[in-house]
Amino acid sequence: MIYINARFLTQRKTGVQQYALVLCRELVKHVPDICFLTPKTDLIDEKWRKEFNILQIGKRNGHFWEQIELPRYLRSVGSPLLLCFTGLSPAFYKNCYFTIHDMSLYAYPKWFRFLYRAVYKVNYAIQSKIARGIFTVSDFSKSEIEKYLTVDPDKITVLPNSVDTSINLKNHIASEAVKHKEILLVGTLEPRKNIEFVINAFLNSKIEDYKLIVVGGLGTAFSKVTFSQHENIVFCGYLSDDDLELKYRDASIFVYPSLYEGFGLPPLEAMQRGCPVMASDRASIPEVCGDAAYYFNPEDSLDFSSKLRELIENYDELSPVLIRNGYHRLEKFDVRDVASKLMDVISQRNI
C-alpha cells in the first residue's frame, strides 16, 4: 500500500495543488493500492470521494495534522511509503518522498514572512537528509535545490508539472474561435508574480482597444485599489475551473511575467487552450515554454511594451505559430510519462 499526503484535497487549488491532483489522477489508473490521507475536514470537491480512496484521520487539521497526526497514524500501520506532492511533509518521517516546487524562499527571502521561511527551511533541512528522495518540477529547480541544500543530486528526481494531452483535439477547434481583445494574467497577486509590473506597463503603453484581465487571489503586498478606476483593467479574483477555462479560450494573449518559478503551469494551461503566450525570460520559464512563447524582460517595462505591441500588430502572423508550437510543447509534459517515471523511481529503489 502506498499512502498519499492528500491534505491538498482540502485546500483551495493553486499551482501546487493542481500538480498533485493531475499526477494522482494518473497514478490511480495504474496502482491499485493507493490510500489518500486527509484531515477530517471538508474536501474542496466532494466528488473526489468517488475518484480517490480517501481515509480521513486525526482530530485536527493544518500543520498539526501534517506534522503530528499524519506520521503517528502511519507508524501505527507499519510505517508504509508516503508520497508528498505539495507544501510540507512530516519532518521526521523517513519512509517518504517529498516535493520541493521551487527555492524562492532561499533565493528571494524578502518575499516571505520570517516564520514561514523558518518553518520551511527547518522542514527541508531535515527531510532532505532522512527522506528516501526528493521530487521537483524542473531542471532549474533541481539546480536550485543543489545550490541551497546539502543533498546528493542523485536523490533528486525531476517530475515536471503535467497536462492531460487527450483534451488537445477539442482545443484545436476552440483556438479557431474568434478571440476577444483581452490580455489575460493568471496568478496570485503577490510580488514574485510581477502582476503590478504588467499593469503599469500596460497603462503606459496606451493600448486602448484591449482590456487587461487579472485573475487570482489577492496577496498581502498588493492592493488593486490603485488600479480599480481604469476601465481597461478588470480584476476577476479567484475563479472556478470552468470560468477560468472560458477566460483562457477568450483571451487573445496570455501574459506570464513571473520573476521566479520552479516550473510555472499557467503558460501550459494557456497553450492547451489555444491562447498565444507572452512569458518572462527568467528562472524555469524558458525551460518550460521553449519555442512556444514570446519572451520579454520582466524588469524592463519598455521591453515588455515593445514586445506586446509587436505581438498585437503582427497577431495574424505570429499567433498561429505560437499556438502550433504550444500544442507541440505540451507533448513534453504528458502526465502518463510523469507517472511512469515516478513509479520507476519507487520500484528501482526497492521500496
Image (cartoon, grey):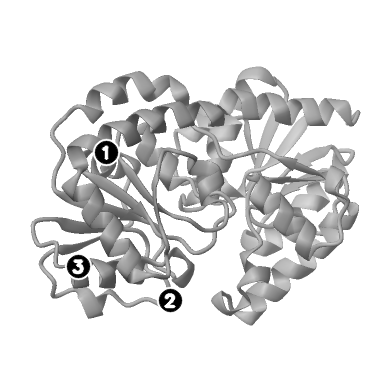
Instruction: Report the amino acid beneath label 2.
Output: Thr
Q: Foreground residue, 170 or 329?
A: 329
Residue 297, percent from left and from top? 42, 62
Residue 82, percent from left and from top? 77, 41
Badge number at residue 36: none
Q: Foreground residue, 210 or 335?
A: 210
Q: Which residue is mark 3?
A: 205
Which of the image's four quarters has the N terminus? top right
Asked if one can make out residue 31 in the rendered structure from this viewpoint, the answer is: yes
Q: Quadrant of residue 23?
A: top right
- The correct choice, above or below, for 329 with respect to 208 in the image is above
Residue found 40% across the figure and 28% down from its top: 327
Between marks 2 and 3 in the image, the one whose residue lies nearer the viewer: 3
Q: Which residue is mark 1?
A: 318
Alpha-carbon distance for marks 1 and 2?
Answer: 37 Å
Q: Which residue is mark 2?
A: 220
Which of the image's four quarters has the C terminus? top right
Contact (Cβ within 8 Å) of mark 1 with mark 2: no
Instruction: Report the amino acid beneath label 3.
Output: Ser
Residue found 37% across the figure and 36% down from its top: 271
Residue found 79% across the figure and 47% down from its top: 73
